Image (tube, helix red, strand yellow):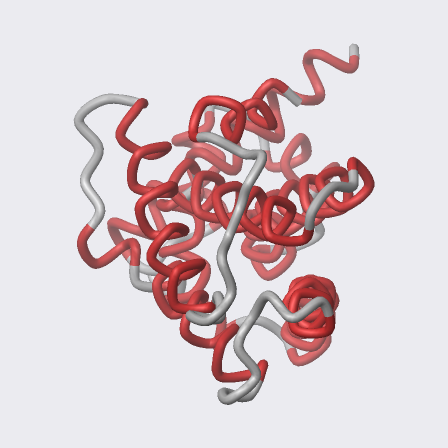
Amino acid sequence: MTRMKQSQVVSDVIRAAVELFALKGYANTSVQDIVSAAGVTKGAMYHYFESKDDLLFGIYDRVLSLQQAHLDAIIAEGGEVDDVLRAVCVDVLETSIEFIAEGTVFFRSMDMLSEQRRKEVVRRRRTYNDEFADLVRRGQREGLFREDIPVAVLIAHFFSDVHYLSYWYSEEKPADRTLAAVQITDLFMSSLRRSDVQHFSSTDDASLASHQAR
Protein backbone atom coordinates (compact mmCIF):
# COMPACT_ATOMS: atom_id res chain seq x y z
CA MET A 1 0.00 0.00 0.00
CA THR A 2 1.44 3.37 -1.01
CA ARG A 3 1.96 6.13 1.53
CA MET A 4 -0.73 8.22 -0.19
CA LYS A 5 -3.19 5.33 0.02
CA GLN A 6 -2.30 4.78 3.68
CA SER A 7 -2.93 8.45 4.46
CA GLN A 8 -6.27 8.30 2.63
CA VAL A 9 -7.41 5.26 4.63
CA VAL A 10 -6.60 6.97 7.93
CA SER A 11 -8.35 10.19 6.82
CA ASP A 12 -11.43 8.33 5.62
CA VAL A 13 -11.72 6.31 8.83
CA ILE A 14 -11.29 9.36 11.06
CA ARG A 15 -13.75 11.41 9.00
CA ALA A 16 -16.37 8.65 9.19
CA ALA A 17 -15.79 8.14 12.92
CA VAL A 18 -16.14 11.85 13.70
CA GLU A 19 -19.41 12.07 11.74
CA LEU A 20 -20.86 8.93 13.33
CA PHE A 21 -19.73 9.72 16.87
CA ALA A 22 -21.36 13.15 16.49
CA LEU A 23 -24.57 11.67 15.09
CA LYS A 24 -25.01 8.47 17.13
CA GLY A 25 -22.60 8.86 20.02
CA TYR A 26 -19.41 6.91 20.68
CA ALA A 27 -21.08 4.06 22.58
CA ASN A 28 -23.74 3.52 19.92
CA THR A 29 -21.34 3.44 16.98
CA SER A 30 -19.89 0.07 15.99
CA VAL A 31 -16.67 -0.63 14.15
CA GLN A 32 -18.80 -2.00 11.30
CA ASP A 33 -20.66 1.33 11.11
CA ILE A 34 -17.33 3.14 10.79
CA VAL A 35 -15.74 0.95 8.13
CA SER A 36 -18.96 0.91 6.09
CA ALA A 37 -19.16 4.71 6.14
CA ALA A 38 -15.43 5.01 5.36
CA GLY A 39 -15.58 2.49 2.52
CA VAL A 40 -12.73 0.36 3.90
CA THR A 41 -12.44 -3.11 5.36
CA LYS A 42 -12.11 -3.89 9.04
CA GLY A 43 -8.64 -5.21 8.30
CA ALA A 44 -7.62 -1.88 6.80
CA MET A 45 -8.93 0.00 9.83
CA TYR A 46 -7.30 -2.35 12.33
CA HIS A 47 -4.00 -1.90 10.49
CA TYR A 48 -3.94 1.69 11.83
CA PHE A 49 -6.23 1.57 14.86
CA GLU A 50 -6.19 -1.34 17.27
CA SER A 51 -9.65 -0.60 18.67
CA LYS A 52 -12.45 1.97 18.80
CA ASP A 53 -10.67 3.39 21.86
CA ASP A 54 -7.53 3.79 19.79
CA LEU A 55 -9.55 5.51 17.08
CA LEU A 56 -11.11 8.01 19.51
CA PHE A 57 -7.64 8.82 20.81
CA GLY A 58 -6.38 9.13 17.23
CA ILE A 59 -9.03 11.72 16.43
CA TYR A 60 -7.72 14.09 19.10
CA ASP A 61 -4.10 13.05 18.66
CA ARG A 62 -4.05 14.75 15.26
CA VAL A 63 -5.13 18.03 16.84
CA LEU A 64 -2.75 17.73 19.80
CA SER A 65 0.21 16.90 17.56
CA LEU A 66 -0.51 19.77 15.17
CA GLN A 67 -0.90 22.35 17.94
CA GLN A 68 2.24 21.17 19.74
CA ALA A 69 4.27 21.31 16.51
CA HIS A 70 3.01 24.83 15.80
CA LEU A 71 3.73 25.97 19.36
CA ASP A 72 7.29 24.66 19.21
CA ALA A 73 7.87 26.28 15.80
CA ILE A 74 6.52 29.68 16.91
CA ILE A 75 8.66 29.66 20.05
CA ALA A 76 11.72 28.58 18.04
CA GLU A 77 11.27 31.56 15.71
CA GLY A 78 11.88 33.84 18.69
CA GLY A 79 10.87 37.45 19.07
CA GLU A 80 9.32 39.68 21.69
CA VAL A 81 7.33 37.61 24.19
CA ASP A 82 4.17 39.63 23.55
CA ASP A 83 4.35 38.82 19.84
CA VAL A 84 5.23 35.17 20.42
CA LEU A 85 2.37 34.59 22.86
CA ARG A 86 -0.06 36.41 20.60
CA ALA A 87 0.93 34.20 17.65
CA VAL A 88 0.52 31.09 19.82
CA CYS A 89 -2.96 32.19 20.92
CA VAL A 90 -4.10 32.86 17.37
CA ASP A 91 -2.76 29.51 16.24
CA VAL A 92 -4.46 27.44 18.94
CA LEU A 93 -7.74 29.22 18.22
CA GLU A 94 -7.48 28.77 14.46
CA THR A 95 -6.59 25.09 14.71
CA SER A 96 -9.30 24.49 17.31
CA ILE A 97 -11.82 26.02 14.89
CA GLU A 98 -10.43 24.05 11.95
CA PHE A 99 -10.87 20.81 13.92
CA ILE A 100 -13.92 21.90 15.88
CA ALA A 101 -15.89 18.74 15.03
CA GLU A 102 -13.03 16.50 16.18
CA GLY A 103 -12.61 18.42 19.42
CA THR A 104 -16.33 18.40 20.18
CA VAL A 105 -16.64 14.66 19.61
CA PHE A 106 -13.55 13.91 21.65
CA PHE A 107 -14.46 15.93 24.74
CA ARG A 108 -18.00 14.55 24.65
CA SER A 109 -16.61 11.00 24.70
CA MET A 110 -13.32 11.41 26.57
CA ASP A 111 -14.63 9.68 29.70
CA MET A 112 -15.05 6.51 27.63
CA LEU A 113 -11.34 6.30 26.85
CA SER A 114 -9.26 3.70 28.65
CA GLU A 115 -7.43 5.00 31.72
CA GLN A 116 -4.10 4.74 29.91
CA ARG A 117 -5.34 6.85 27.02
CA ARG A 118 -6.88 9.47 29.31
CA LYS A 119 -3.58 9.79 31.17
CA GLU A 120 -1.75 10.22 27.87
CA VAL A 121 -4.11 13.03 26.82
CA VAL A 122 -3.67 14.75 30.19
CA ARG A 123 0.13 14.41 29.96
CA ARG A 124 0.30 15.93 26.51
CA ARG A 125 -2.12 18.74 27.29
CA ARG A 126 -0.04 19.53 30.38
CA THR A 127 3.10 19.73 28.23
CA TYR A 128 1.42 22.30 26.00
CA ASN A 129 0.02 24.15 29.01
CA ASP A 130 3.45 24.32 30.66
CA GLU A 131 5.08 25.86 27.59
CA PHE A 132 2.23 28.36 27.32
CA ALA A 133 2.63 29.21 31.01
CA ASP A 134 6.36 29.73 30.52
CA LEU A 135 5.59 32.45 27.98
CA VAL A 136 3.27 34.19 30.43
CA ARG A 137 5.91 34.01 33.19
CA ARG A 138 8.54 35.35 30.80
CA GLY A 139 6.30 38.34 30.11
CA GLN A 140 5.89 38.85 33.85
CA ARG A 141 9.65 38.75 34.42
CA GLU A 142 10.10 41.36 31.70
CA GLY A 143 7.52 43.56 33.40
CA LEU A 144 4.99 43.36 30.57
CA PHE A 145 2.25 41.13 32.01
CA ARG A 146 0.27 41.57 35.19
CA GLU A 147 1.25 39.62 38.31
CA ASP A 148 -1.74 40.35 40.53
CA ILE A 149 -3.58 37.26 39.20
CA PRO A 150 -2.09 33.73 39.37
CA VAL A 151 -0.72 32.37 36.10
CA ALA A 152 -3.07 29.37 36.35
CA VAL A 153 -6.08 31.70 36.41
CA LEU A 154 -4.79 33.75 33.47
CA ILE A 155 -4.31 30.58 31.42
CA ALA A 156 -7.71 29.17 32.43
CA HIS A 157 -9.27 32.46 31.29
CA PHE A 158 -7.85 32.02 27.78
CA PHE A 159 -8.47 28.30 27.34
CA SER A 160 -12.04 28.56 28.59
CA ASP A 161 -12.66 30.65 25.46
CA VAL A 162 -10.99 27.98 23.33
CA HIS A 163 -13.07 25.16 24.83
CA TYR A 164 -16.30 27.18 24.49
CA LEU A 165 -15.91 27.66 20.72
CA SER A 166 -18.15 24.73 19.80
CA TYR A 167 -21.08 26.33 21.61
CA TRP A 168 -21.23 29.47 19.52
CA TYR A 169 -18.83 29.50 16.55
CA SER A 170 -20.36 29.28 13.08
CA GLU A 171 -18.24 29.77 9.98
CA GLU A 172 -19.63 31.33 6.82
CA LYS A 173 -16.27 31.71 5.10
CA PRO A 174 -12.69 30.56 5.92
CA ALA A 175 -11.57 34.11 6.76
CA ASP A 176 -13.97 34.07 9.71
CA ARG A 177 -11.74 31.77 11.73
CA THR A 178 -8.75 34.12 11.52
CA LEU A 179 -10.92 37.11 12.43
CA ALA A 180 -12.42 35.30 15.43
CA ALA A 181 -8.98 34.06 16.50
CA VAL A 182 -7.47 37.55 16.35
CA GLN A 183 -10.39 39.16 18.20
CA ILE A 184 -10.38 36.62 21.04
CA THR A 185 -6.59 36.83 21.26
CA ASP A 186 -6.66 40.63 21.44
CA LEU A 187 -9.18 40.49 24.28
CA PHE A 188 -6.94 38.07 26.18
CA MET A 189 -3.73 39.99 25.52
CA SER A 190 -5.39 43.25 26.62
CA SER A 191 -6.42 41.65 29.91
CA LEU A 192 -2.92 40.21 30.37
CA ARG A 193 -0.84 43.33 29.79
CA ARG A 194 -0.01 45.69 32.63
CA SER A 195 -1.99 48.90 32.33
CA ASP A 196 0.92 51.02 33.54
CA VAL A 197 3.29 49.86 30.79
CA GLN A 198 3.12 51.32 27.29
CA HIS A 199 2.91 48.53 24.75
CA PHE A 200 4.70 48.44 21.42
CA SER A 201 4.35 45.45 19.08
CA SER A 202 6.13 44.59 15.86
CA THR A 203 3.26 42.30 14.90
CA ASP A 204 0.26 43.49 12.90
CA ASP A 205 -2.76 41.43 11.89
CA ALA A 206 -1.37 40.68 8.43
CA SER A 207 2.01 39.40 9.55
CA LEU A 208 0.39 37.52 12.42
CA ALA A 209 -1.35 35.20 9.98
CA SER A 210 1.94 34.29 8.28
CA HIS A 211 2.37 31.22 10.49
CA GLN A 212 -0.49 29.63 8.51
CA ALA A 213 1.89 29.11 5.61
CA ARG A 214 3.82 26.64 7.74
Q: Is residue 154 above or below residue 64?
A: below
Residue under the point 55% across and 88% down: 150
Place residue 37 in its image quadrant: top left
Front residue of 89/67: it is 89
Instruction: Quadrant for the C terminus, please.
Output: top right
Front residue of 185/146: it is 146
Q: Give the x, y percent position of residue 9.
A: 61, 24
Front residue of 187/105: it is 187
Left or right side of 212 for 176: left
The answer to whether residue 117 of the structure is visible from this angle is no
Left or right side of 158 for 214: right
Instruction: Quadrant for the N terminus, please.
Output: top right
Residue under the point 66% across and 65% down: 139
The answer to whether residue 205 of the structure is visible from this angle is yes
Q: Is residue 100 above or below residue 137?
A: above
* Numbered label tally: 0
Place residue 70 in its image quadrant: top right
Q: Give the x, y percent position of residue 188.
A: 40, 61
Q: Give the x, y percent position of residue 2.
A: 78, 10
Residue at the right extreme, as displayed: 76
Front residue of 141/151: it is 141
Residue under the point 60% across and 18% down: 213
Q: Give the x, y percent position of residue 80.
A: 69, 47
Place residue 176 in its image quadrant: top left
Residue under the point 60% across and 28% down: 211
